[in-house]
Amino acid sequence: MKRLNERQERILLSLKKLDYLNRDQINKIHRLGTIRNTNRILKQLSPYLSSYREDYSTIYYLNNKGREYVNSEKIRKKTKFVNHVLMRNDFYIYAGFPREWKNEVELSLGDIKIICDAWFRVNGKYYALEVDLDQTMKENRNKIEKYRKLLSNNAIKESLGHLPTLIWFTTTEFRKKKLIDLCKGLPHAVYTTNDIK
């Protein structure tokens, strides 16, 4: 298999880590400069990538050859959940590309189990990210109650040295206000897509 240069490998590794990226996200993460330059690099990587157009954007993910190159077993396909993943990746970019970042992490304590969209650490502090794209507010309320039970247990604070902050990333100011109300009493922060532009 042909050896790629370091920048090309980093792009493939970011797709392994983040599942799906649009062109603008790839441009920001890898500081590729102009859109023309980004397009040129992505064209060079086309043997390793699958892509499709959605909402005026091209979405990229690893194909079989790309997965083989970066030793990834996770098969990605075109999916209706891609906008949820892209939103999560927007927050990854906003958070400054945390080195410690894991997607779809199960947090559990006794019979309480939550799968957060991302679990990450910045400046020694842990955060759980929840992306609110098309869930009902009832689903969000139920999830927040699980977090409330989980975070009220001293074992978490003792093992991490602090309580993790619950971050919600949502689409509208209306939903932001609702989530802020629901999270009262928890360490939390709520952002909209406009807040991080």
Image (tube, rainbow, N blue to C red):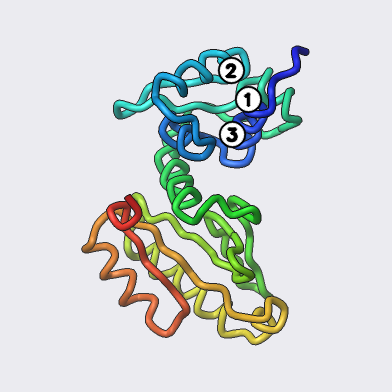
Image position, residue 106 (x, y; %): 63, 60
Name which residue lies at 40% across and 70% down: 189
Q: Is residue 151 above or below residue 122?
A: below
CA–CA distance between discs 3 and 1? 11 Å
* 157 to the left or right of 166: right
Q: Which is nearer the eye, 104 or 91?
A: 91
Q: Which is nearer the eye, 108 or 72?
A: 72
Residue type pointed to by label 2: Leu
Say few, some or many: other residues with alpha carbon within 10 Å of mark 3 (under 14 / 14 to 19 / 20 or more). Answer: many
Q: Which is nearer the eye, 64 or 95?
A: 95
| SS assignment at label 1 | helix
> Residue at label 3?
15
Q: Quadrant of residue 10?
A: top right
| SS assignment at label 3 | helix
> Residue at label 1?
8
CA–CA distance between discs 1 and 2? 7 Å
| SS assignment at label 2 | loop
CA–CA distance between discs 3 and 2? 12 Å
Name which residue lies at 44% across and 39% down: 81
Of all residues, the one furthest to the left in this rendering is 174
* 142 to the left or right of 98: left
Q: Quadrant of residue 52?
A: top left
Say few, some or many: other residues with alpha carbon within 10 Å of mark 1 (under 14 / 14 to 19 / 20 or more). Answer: some
- Sequence-wise, which precedes: disc 3 or disc 2? 3
Q: Quadrant of the N terminus?
A: top right
Image position, residue 111 (x, y; %): 65, 73
Q: Which mark is residue 45?
A: 2
